[in-house]
Image: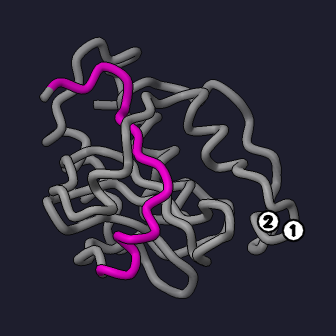
Amino acid sequence: MADQKLADRLDRAAIVAEARSWIDTPYRHQASLKGAGADCLGLIRGVYRAFYGSEKEPIAPYSPNWAEETGQETLRDAARRHLVEIDAAPFRDGAPLQEGDVILIRVKDRGPAKHAAIVSGADSIIHAYDRHAVAENVLPAAWRRRIAYAFQFPGVTD
């Protein structure tokens, strides 16, 4: 897949398959290397690279509590530059999630979106989080209510 540059048409199942290939990659803050280490953003970056080649902008170093330090929607802003935004409200209200979509979740009710995951089924996600390797989990109801933003990879076909 890595040689498929600028995917004009991208199958949802292919996105999920690529994300699943990252499962058991150890959690490493700021990392994005399959099998070696990734955080939640690193997983999204790695899947993006698999279909589009190199990343379009460098990632500045960030602390584990970057969102609390700035209060800005930095993750959302970056996603808007590279992904296609879709309405997140139906997902918060219980509508089935779409395979291959990227969701951004608020860790605190009123805080900025700080966690990213790839949807792998109607109620499941693939993500990495502190002290846990990349994993596929059921999306807890509490997290579903905190979905702040949702995106598709460019060129996704339904």
- Marks 1 and 2 sit apart, C-alpha to C-alpha, by 5 Å
In the rendered image, the quadrant that contains the C terminus is: top left
Q: Is residue 57 above or below residue 124?
A: above
The N terminus - image quarter: top left
> Which residue shows up at 49% across the image and 56% down it?
148
Question: Which of these two is toward me, 5 or 78?
Answer: 78
Q: Which residue is mark 2?
A: 66
Number of numbered tags placed on the structure image: 2
| Residue 137 location, quadrant | bottom left
Q: Residue furthest right?
A: 69
Asked whether the beta carbons under mark 1 and mark 2 sit within 8 Å of each other, the answer is yes
Amino acid type at image mark 2:
Trp
Residue type at mark 1? Glu
Residue 155: within the magenta?
yes
In the image, taking residue 90 as reference, residue 73 lies left or right, namely: right
Counting from the top left corner in percent of width and height, residue 113 is at 60, 60
Q: Which residue is mark 1?
A: 69
Specify the quadrant of the image occupied by residue 108: bottom right
Residue at image location 79% in from the left, 71% down from the top: 68
Q: Is residue 4 magenta?
A: no
What x and y, as percent, mark residue 138?
23, 77
Q: Secondary structure at mark 2?
A: helix
Say left or right for 108 vs 14. Answer: right
Judged from the image, the secondary structure of the residue bearing numbered disc 1 is helix
Query: Most extreme residue toward the bottom, as rendered?
Result: 131
At 38% from the left edge and 81% from the top edge, which residue is drawn?
142
Instruction: Give the residues drawn in magenta, as a range.
Output: 141-157
Q: Quadrant of residue 28?
A: bottom right
What's the mark number on residue 104? none
Q: Relative to residue 50, is residue 119 drawn left or right?
A: left
Q: Residue at x 27, y 62 (%)?
A: 93
Q: How is the image coloured?
A: one colour
